[in-house]
Amino acid sequence: MKKMEKFQIRSASPVDYTMQTIGGKWKPIVLYLISKKINRFGLLKRGIFGISKQMLTKQLRELEADGLITRKIYAEIPPRVEYFISEKGYSIFPVIDSMYAWGEAHMEFDEDENVIFKNE
């Protein structure tokens, strides 16, 4: 008899499942940038204000484990790694595109054209 794997059951909500997959501060941004061909670690790090190397590594690993991105390692010296959106990853883009559209419609700027974040 096979041993059953243990799964943490949170809720049966599809919204909860989606949030567990792409929720948090960084994953939607990482997905968006990779879709725009900003797909190397250094470029992603420079493109995401405030993310640490450790956090970016964690987010990339989680997105890869969830099947939303793929990683390609090139046999070069020094080694080059690029990330790509997977087929499953592209299926989440209606959500990402809606987030982009909502943000674009509601962003506010100061006199120097800096985005105003109300929670800062």
Image: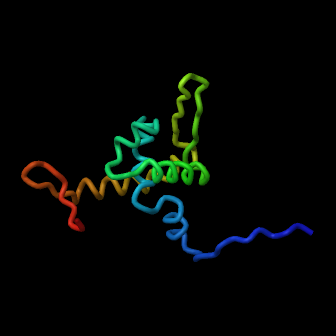
Q: In the image, is residue 60 above or below residue 106? A: above
Q: What residue appears at the point 13 percent right and 49 percent down from the top-left corner?
A: 113
Residue 28 occupies which quadrant of the picture?
A: bottom left
Which residue is depicted at the point 39% across and 37% down? 43
Q: Position of residue 50 (x, y in %)?
A: 33, 52
Q: Is residue 104 above or below residue 34?
A: below
Vertical position of residue 97 compared to residue 118: above or below: above
Q: Residue furthest right?
A: 1
Quadrant of the snapshot with the N terminus: bottom right
Q: How far across and how far down the image is residue 115, in percent?
A: 19, 54
The vertical placement of 2 against 99, above or below, is: below
State the scheme by which the image is colored: rainbow
Rendered location of residue 23, percent (x, y): 46, 62
The residue located at (57%, 39%) in the rendering is: 71
- Location of the C terminus (image quadrant): bottom left
Residue nearer the viewer, 11 or 97? 11
Point out residue 76 in the picture as x, y percentages from the top left corner.
57, 22
Q: Quadrant of residue 98?
A: bottom left
Q: How many marks?
A: 0
Dividing the picture into quadrants, the one containing residue 45 is top left
Point out the residue furthest to the top here: 77
Q: Is residue 64 left or right of residue 103?
A: right
Residue at (46% x, 53% y) in the render: 55
